[in-house]
């Protein structure tokens, strides 16, 4: 169900989770922490075997990393 697009643009809940997971490093790790991580290129479609649990876990990991970066910044 999460793989099926819910809107004409083709976005699905799984794709949205994959997108959010991909952009967290761009903003927090790259921009605020200053680390040289690969820049997200817009290709955030989850693989056909991806599960909701896997995508949620990956997003939670990305958010935890972003939270740690934000907590270490003294000028946000």
Image (spheres, rainbow, N blue to C red):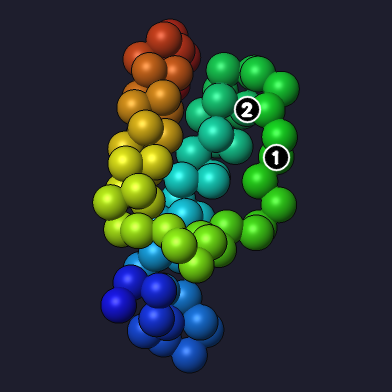
Horizontal side of 9 relative to 71 (left or right) equals: right
Q: Which residue is drawn at 37% across and 32% down?
A: 61
Which residue, as the protein is rendered here, is positioned at the far front?
A: 49
Q: In this view, does 10 lie above or below 39?
A: below
Classify mark 2: residues with Cα within 10 Å, few (<14), some (14-19) or many (20+): some
Q: Is residue 50 above or below residue 22?
A: below
Horizontal side of 12 relative to 33 (left or right) equals: left
Where disc 1 sits, the SS reads loop
Q: Which residue is drawn at 53% across and 61% down?
A: 47
Percent x, y for residue 7?
A: 41, 86
Q: Which residue is drawn at 51% across and 29% down?
A: 28
Q: In which quadrant will I find the N terminus? A: bottom left
Classify mark 1: residues with Cα within 10 Å, few (<14), some (14-19) or many (20+): few
Percent x, y for residue 22?
A: 54, 46
Horizontal side of 17 relative to 44 (left or right) equals: left
Percent x, y for residue 3?
A: 40, 74
Residues marked 2 and 1 touching at CB (< 8 Å):
yes
Which image quadrant for residue 44? Answer: bottom right
Which image quadrant for residue 12? Answer: bottom left
Residue bearing mark 2: 30
Would residue 16 be visible to someone looking at this image? Answer: no
Compare residues 74 and 50 and report the one nearer the observer: 50
Label located before the other in sequence (2 or 1): 2
**C-alpha separation, residue under disc 2 versus residue under disc 1:** 8 Å
Residue bearing mark 1: 39
Would residue 30 be visible to someone looking at this image? Answer: yes
Compare residues 48 and 66 and report the one nearer the observer: 48
Where disc 2 sits, the SS reads helix
Percent x, y for residue 57?
A: 32, 41
């Amino acid at each position: 169900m999460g793989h099926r697009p819910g809107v004409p643009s083709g976005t699905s809940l799984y794709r949205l989770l994959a997108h959010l997971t991909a952009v967290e490093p761009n903003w927090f790790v790259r921009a605020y922490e200053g680390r040289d991580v690969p820049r997200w290129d817009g290709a955030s479609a989850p693989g056909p075997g991806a599960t909701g649990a896997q995508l949620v876990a990956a997003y939670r990991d990305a958010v935890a990393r972003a939270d740690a970066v934000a907590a270490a910044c003294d000028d946000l």
